[in-house]
Image: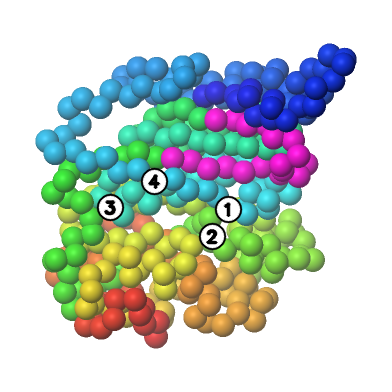
Amino acid sequence: MHYRKDIGHKGLVRLNRSIAYQSAGVDIDAGNRAVELMKASVMETYTSRVLAGIGAFGGLFDAADLGKQPVLVASTDGVGTKVELAARLGRYHGIGEDIVNHCIDDILVQGARPLFFLDYFATAKLNPGVAAEIVSGMADACKAAGCVLLGGETAEMPGVYQENAFDVAGTIVGIVERGKILPDQPSMQAGDILIGFASSGPHTNGYSLIRKLCEGEDLLAYNESLKSSLADALLAPHRSYLNVVGPVLPMIKGMAHITGGGFIENIPRMLPEGLQAVVDRSTWPQPTLFKWMQQQGNIEEREMYRVFNMGIGLVAVIRPDVWAAVRSTVTEPVWRIGELRKGNRSEVVIQ
């Protein structure tokens, strides 16, 4: 875990008098305090495979004996404008969970389990407590997934971000056996069924629209229909499906993480040419939050399915004959939501 000290130094105007880096808006001492606050939670994620972590120029991870034909899977993503809502409400821990779990799900759909994660946190003025709280959320998500928080970058960039604004991104590296890479497109056929795993809310997508819908709303007031405040509902952390899907992974032919682009853009990414997904929206309960958003913005139905996950964070393809086994094995909400039919792969049918 490092604190960047080089950003902006070339832009300092040469003056006759001596100036300090802090006068330009970068507080090196605050960066060091942030690292000290992060250290304990980061080290709790370490395993015997970590050969170098905090303080090193790069994290070292022992990759020996990880499989017969191991393939590394890497992905980078961000939390998007959900961070603005979190900053406004002073809720930071969940943002750390968001970025890790989002990345875990992105490689899970290729059959991979996570090995290690690296983060990037940037802000206008570093608040060590805020940075540490976000990293604590990352560490908690990593521990739940058996993933090491191997390193990261904390950048203080005055003049780039507005006051109190910040951004979070992360990179994850996982592993899968070559023969178990998903999707297994050659095995997919018409008649295979689609199953959906419940989301915890909007996860990390659609927040630019959500923030617009929430203009003028009291986010902290209790909402009877939601059984919570809007703040609680909207900032619920992104779910990781690693431990949910793990026990039934051998029965799955392919998966789609329902992120930016919703059902419409993400489901086709796992399908072969000649097959299309047909989704029956009556097969799972539509969460109240999404109904509220649709009514609040008078949003067309298809647009909802192109922006949001609509209560389904992960869609998988399985054979019809294993559905009973999957349903009895998975201990969390999962529904049979549709099937594959012959057709144009890029056209997801919502009916």
Position of residue 244 relative to residue 342, above or below, is above
* Residue 150 horizontal side relative to residue 212, left or right: left
Residue at coordinates 60% horizontally, 79% vertically from top-left? 299
At numbered mark 1, what does the secondary structure look like: helix, strand or loop? loop
Tag shown at residue 80: 1
Tell how many labels.
Answer: 4
- Whether residues under marks 1 and 2 lie with C-beta atoms below 8 angstroms apart, the answer is yes
At numbered mark 2, what does the secondary structure look like: helix, strand or loop? loop
Which residue is tagged 4?
75
Residue at coordinates 49% horizontally, 80% vertically from top-left? 302
Which residue is tagged 2?
205
At numbered mark 3, what does the secondary structure look like: helix, strand or loop? loop
Q: Looking at the image, tell me whether mark 4 or mark 2 is earlier in sequence order.
A: 4
Position of residue 138 relative to residue 112, above or below, is above
Mark 3 to mark 1: distance in Å? 23 Å
Percent coordinates x, y for residue 202 in the rendering: 53, 61
Q: Looking at the image, tell me whether mark 1 or mark 4 is earlier in sequence order.
A: 4
Residue at coordinates 52% horizontally, 82% vertically from top-left? 301
- Whether residues under marks 3 and 1 lie with C-beta atoms below 8 angstroms apart, the answer is no
At label 1, the amino acid type is: Gly
Neighbour tally class for label 4: few under 14, some 14-19, many 20 plus, Cα within 10 Å: some
Q: Which residues are magenta?
A: 153-171
Mark 4 to mark 3: distance in Å? 11 Å
Who is closer to the viewer here, 290 or 38?
38
At label 2, the amino acid type is: Asn
Image quadrant in which the C terminus is located: bottom left
**Residue 211 among magenta residues:** no
* Residue 100 horizontal side relative to residue 66, left or right: right
